[in-house]
Structures are given as structure tokens and as C-alpha cells.
Image (cartoon, helix red, strand yellow):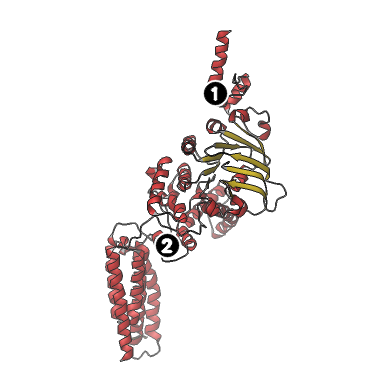
Amino acid sequence: MKEISLYEEKDTPIHALDPLTKILYILAAILVPALYGGRTAMAAFIAASIAVLLAGRVLRRTLPILSFSFIVLITVVIIQGLFRAGNTTVAFALGPVVFYREGLSFALGIGLNVVNILLSFSILVLTTRPSDLVEAMVRLGLSPKLGYVLASVFQIIPQMTATMGTITDAQRSRGMETEGSLLVRIKAFLPLIAPVVMNSLITTKERAIALEVRGFDSRREKTFLRERKARGRDKAVNALLAVLIVLALIGRVTIWLT
Amino acid sequence: MAHIAVQHLKYRYPLTDELALRDISFTVGEGEFIGIIGQNGAGKSTLCQALCGIIPSFYKGAYGGKVLIDGEEAAKTPVAELCRKVGIVFQNPFSQVTGSKLTVYEEIAFGLENLGLPREEMVRRIDHALELLDIQALREQNPFDLSGGQMQRMAIAGIIAMEPQVIILDEPTSQLDPQGSEEVFRAVQKLCLQGITILMVEHKMEKIAAYSDRVMLMDKGEIVDFDTPQKIFSLDCLEACGVQPPAFTQICRGLGLRNGDTGLYPVTLEEAHKALDQIKGGAAHG
């Protein structure tokens, strides 16, 4: 089954963690460096995220995500290194192009921040089934209807793509040119729109009725087939993260007071 | 009291001039297996949707008369409440998959979660439904990876697990192979034996003849007749209503072979056999 999520099914302790714990980790990874510790804290969280991703055996999957962000980061390094206001100390020069220490240092800060956030989100996205995440959010009070929309998107979009493939094949078998130059492909795309949209609307209507007769709109309080996974380990990690956030907050307050 | 009572039901779809249902009245008792037959456009699906409240809650349009399910008026009860009493299975198995669940087991639980059942009760009902439809082996599969027949059986399991007193099946086997259809019919018959009322729209007349207690013949939004399969399939107006009687009935009709006691044409292989034996017996006596 093709799914449009980055999740990879594996049996590791990281996969088994409660989705909410992973969300709390993201919060900690963003809040703690922002409140107290700055770059040292960011670097510590980056190291922790890499260790966790390794334990979850999904570190390699972060490479495409990181390499994309590196393109952006390199432009940040160049622009800040060359042109940042307040650039005074020369770091190094490549011919006439002069990089300044202040700008590079600022760019490093941005870089660490971006990598930290990306890696902490990667833990959640790569090791949590989308449906588990949605379910955890519904338990927390997200509307079950919105939860359904979020959870179904992951499967229904690939199904719509498959339908589109079938319709393209049907049109191709009746002589429609679908391959070749850009113009040919654009021309082939137009007659697809009506059947694909109609088909989706009909299926959506039928599905809406089918959901309705299974009590989708029921006013009763929803229950869950799967037991909530919060176990000792989740609680311990949650407590640790909460303590870190609180300590960072205390640190920030002390700085203000002194 | 009748389990299902329909009184003078009339319905017209929005933006149309013709009535899709014209003054329909009938009653069905608890645990009956009702076959609904008729050509396309006869109003069979419309009737099914009116029985479970989709009409008039989902489709607006002009509605008249009453549908009572176990004394409760369908038009005045929200579909999400009425579904505890009446379940419906549609023709297209694909559009009945919720799309939000990753395994067959969770998919069947969808309705039960909405009803707010405790976990142990869900597990009991899902296991029962899986067993009844003989799909235990599929429980961990992704619903979208199933074949049409398997998907349809999963859809039926999802309804059965909600334990309604009435199950309506609107051409559930039209996209299934012969073996898949037979499995669905057997499962439905098992349900019927457990006291659940079944209303099934079908074009496979052999199956309708073999499984139904009574058959409703519909045409142009009206009930032409509602009686035993033998009486319905012996009607002369059958072909005018766009219905081909079962092969056994057609053969016996061609041969002029009637049941000696009732004067009606046989509708199943067993009945045809019996009628033939009666003639042989008669010939031997003569």
C-alpha cells in the first residue's frame, strides 16, 4: 500500500514511544535553547536527536530532508557572511570576496536552529504512524471529524492518484496521446480533469453516506479500539523533558532578575 | 408489532419531476429474509436509503408517509442514531472503506468507536464479525490492499459489528465473483438465522429464490407484488417488469412443470426435482 507519509514501520523503542512524548520533545528542543543555553543547548539537542534517530534506525531517512535545507542554509551563510550589518572582523577572504566573523557566526546560529528543529520533527514524522498521531491528538481533544480528515488524507490521496492513472489509461486506450512534449502532455491533462473531479465527487458522496451509517455524526462520546500506550517509559521521558523546560525557564528568569 | 412498517411512503429526488417512490406500504416481521427485485430505476435503492434514514436526512427532496423501524420513525431520527437499529451495505465496496484506518481490524472498529463502546465489547464484536464473514486471515491487512470481494465482506463485517436488528444490502454482490457472492449470501443467511431481519436488493434471481422468505417485486417506484418466491416468479408480468425468473423456473415454465400442490412453478433446483418426481410418480401410477 502506497502512502504519502515518511513513516517507516520498524520495531524499535523509539517507534513504541507515545506520539505525545515526541511532540513534547519537539517543544523542548525549541523552547530550551530559546529560553536558556542558546547554541550549546541547540548543539546538545541536535546530538540527542541524532542519537534518537539512530536508535530508531531512521537516520538515513533524514538525509533528503537535511540536504534540501542545506541549499537554503548555504545562501544564508553567503549572504550573512558577506553583507550582515555590523560585519567588522574579517574571517577570511577568497580573492575580492571577504567573509566576516560576525556574519558567519550569526549564520551558524540560524543553521543550528534549523537543523535542530528539522531533526526533532523528523523523530516524530519518521517513527510515528500518522493514524497514531491523529488518534493521540483526538484523545487530547481535537475534533474527531478533523481527526478523520487528517488521518484519511494519507490514504485517500494515493487512491485518487490511482484513479487518475486508471482514467489516463482508459483515455490512452482510446487514442489520446499522453506522452511526448510538454504541450502534448498539457493537452492530455485537460480532458482528465472532468472525469477525475466527477469521480472524486461521487466517491466522496458515497463515502460520506457510508460513514454516516456507521455513526460518524454520533453525539456519543467516542471510544478507542487501541489502548493508550502511555507506559512507564513514556512517563519517564515526559518528566525529564518537562524538567528540562522548567529548568530553562528558571534560568531565563534568573537572567532577567540579575 | 411489525418490525419494519412502511406507510404510504412517497419520495421525489430534488430537481426531478417524477416520484421515485409512489405510495409504498408494507410490513416486515422480525428475522425475515426479504429479497427486493426489479429493473434499474424501479426505486429499490431509493427504498433502501429511505429505510435507514439517508432519505430524507442526506438527500432532500419531497418526502411523504412514514417509515417505522421497531416503532421509531426513520425520518425523525438522526442517521447516526438509527444506525444502531438498521445497517446498510452498498454496492461499491471501495467507497465504503473509511480511509482513516490502516488494518481491517481497525476498519471494522470504526463504527464501534463512534458508538462509544467499551474496548472489550469492541474486541468481542469484531472477532465475531470476522469469524462470521470468514476474514480472520485478513485482520492485519490494509483495507485498500484487499480484492473487491474481500473489501465487501469487510464492509459487511463493519456493519454486522454494530449489531443492528435490520441489515439492508443494496446489490452487495454485483462486483463479486461467483464464489465471493456465495460467501456473502451464506454469511447473510447465517445472520438471518440469528434473528436479524435482512432486506437484500439483488439481480441474481437464483440466489434470491433460494434464500428469501418473501420477495418484493418493484417497478416504476411501486410495489408490484410482495409474496413468496414461488408466487413472485410465477407472475406473468415478471418480464414486463424487466426481471428474468431463475433458470429453473424458466425451464419448468417451458416444460409446463408445476408443483402439483400449489400450481406454482418451482424456483430452485430442489423444487424442480420434486415437481419432476411428482410427475414421474404420477406417470408410474398411470
Residue drawn at point x = 41 percent, y = 53 percent = B102
Mark 1, other Cα within 10 Å: few <14 / some 14–19 / many ≥20: some
Question: In the image as oriented, which residue stretches furthest toward the right?
Answer: B17
Disc 2 vs disc 1: which is toward the camera?
1
Q: Quadrant of the N terminus of chain B?
A: top right
Picture coordinates of residue A240, whole percent (x, y) = 28, 72
| Secondary structure category for the residue under label 2 | helix
Q: Which residue is mark 2?
A: A134
Picture coordinates of residue A178, whole percent (x, y) = 54, 53
- Return the residue nearer the eye: A129 or B171: B171
Residue drawn at point x = 33 percent, y = 74 percent = A29
Q: Chain of mark 2?
A: A
- Return the residue nearer the eye: A40 or A162: A40
Picture coordinates of residue B257, whole percent (x, y) = 60, 19
Q: Is residue B113 above or below residue B256?
A: below
Q: Is residue B119 left or right of residue B1?
A: left
Q: Which residue is mark 1?
A: B271
- Return the residue nearer the eye: B260 or B182: B260
What amino acid is labelled 2 in the image?
Val
Please indicate, yes or no, whether residue B58 appears anywhere in the rendered image.
no
Residue drawn at point x = 27 percent, y = 64 percent = A232
**Quarter holding residue B90:** top right
**Quarter holding residue A122:** bottom left
Could you tell me how far apart the alpha carbons at marks 2 and 1 are, in whole angstroms?
Answer: 56 Å
